Image (spheres, grey):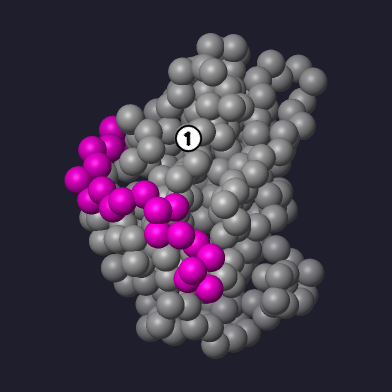
């Protein structure tokens, strides 16, 4: 079963690097950035075999793996790689979600396949004791003519990180801020008001450093005004002005801030959106 596919991403003419988007069948997006000397893979999906083989087809440069956060749909492919970086605040989250059964439930729900269509041997075994290198705010990875700068953006999880492709003027915001940012899991998510502080902080820190924003699910490119829109969404939730659409995901109940269609597109034409716990504003 081919679980992963890839496509090249166009970069500015004056950027010497390369960027490839890798898509999983369950809808996660990963990014392989290459400079003149090294490569970086950002995220590893749900832990299905074959990601490393694909990456090795795409590049022969020495590879570093960066994990944006510890959720099962982003971090579980790390056992295929010798070394991966992740913020230590998400280690316990990774460990709590790495079982094969939990990953199978998520993947089959996302793809809509019956269990027999995803063979058991396709899943990497759980490795709760995988040893991550520490990924911290302010780190930068020099790929040779291209740099990946790391910014902490807690909220969706405690250790959530975003990646700036400096020379390409592209920010990979992942799940930290997108059109369906989950804030309803009290074990790892912040309150809406705490999250708003982080949105404003990252907006100010990255002002003028990017032209495009990429996320890590379904449709790659986000509205470049994402952070400003998210501040307004947070304000509406905090002031009791959200649309408060009921939502359920893997047994958890929450509210969607802005009414949307089945493709997660806001009905009012905006982009940013929150899925939140009304008891944790």
Q: Residue at x 50, y 40 (%)?
A: 51
Q: Is residue 212 left or right of residue 278?
A: right
Label 1: how many Cα within 10 Å (few below 14, some 14–19, many 20+) = some
Report x, y in % for residue 205.
52, 39
Viewer-nearest residue: 154 or 36: 36
Residue 40, placed above or below residue 61:
below
Q: Residue at x 65, y 30 (%)?
A: 19
Q: Residue at x 60, y 81 (%)?
A: 242
Viewer-nearest residue: 92 or 117: 117
Viewer-nearest residue: 223 or 199: 223
Report x, y in % for residue 22.
61, 42
Residue range corresponding to the magenta coloring: 114-137
Q: Is residue 129 magenta?
A: yes
Q: Residue at x 54, y 87 (%)?
A: 246
Viewer-nearest residue: 1 or 130: 1
Report x, y in % for residue 59.
58, 22
Q: Is residue 170 magenta?
A: no
Q: Which residue is mark 1?
A: 52
Report x, y in % for residue 181.
53, 64
Is the stretch drawn in magenta largely helix, strand or loop? loop
């Amino acid at each position: 079963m081919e679980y992963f596919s890839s496509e090249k991403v166009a970069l500015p003419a004056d950027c010497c690097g390369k960027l490839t988007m890798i898509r999983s069948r369950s809808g996660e997006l990963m990014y392989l950035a290459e400079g003149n000397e090294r490569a970086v893979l950002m995220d590893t999906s749900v832990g299905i075999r074959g990601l490393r083989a694909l990456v090795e087809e795409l590049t022969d440069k020495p590879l570093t793996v960066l994990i944006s956060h510890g959720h099962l749909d982003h971090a579980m492919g790390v056992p295929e790689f010798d070394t991966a970086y992740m913020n230590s605040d998400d280690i316990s989250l990774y460990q709590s979600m790495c079982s094969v059964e939990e990953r199978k439930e998520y993947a089959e729900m996302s793809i809509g396949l019956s269990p027999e269509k995803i063979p058991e041997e396709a899943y990497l075994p759980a490795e709760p004791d995988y040893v991550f290198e520490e990924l911290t705010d302010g780190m930068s990875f020099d790929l040779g003519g291209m740099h990946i700068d790391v910014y902490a953006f807690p909220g969706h999880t405690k250790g959530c990180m975003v990646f700036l492709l400096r020379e390409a003027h592209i920010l990979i915001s992942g799940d930290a801020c997108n059109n369906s940012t989950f804030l309803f899991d009290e074990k790892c998510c912040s309150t809406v008001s705490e999250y708003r502080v982080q949105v404003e902080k990252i907006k100010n820190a990255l002002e003028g450093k990017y032209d495009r924003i990429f996320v890590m699910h379904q449709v790659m490119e986000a509205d470049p005004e994402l952070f400003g829109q998210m501040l307004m969404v947070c304000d509406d939730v905090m002031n009791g002005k959200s649309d408060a659409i009921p939502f359920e995901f893997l047994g958890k109940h929450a509210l969607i801030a802005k009414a949307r269609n089945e493709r997660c597109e806001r009905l009012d034409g905006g982009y940013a959106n929150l899925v939140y716990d009304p008891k944790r504003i």
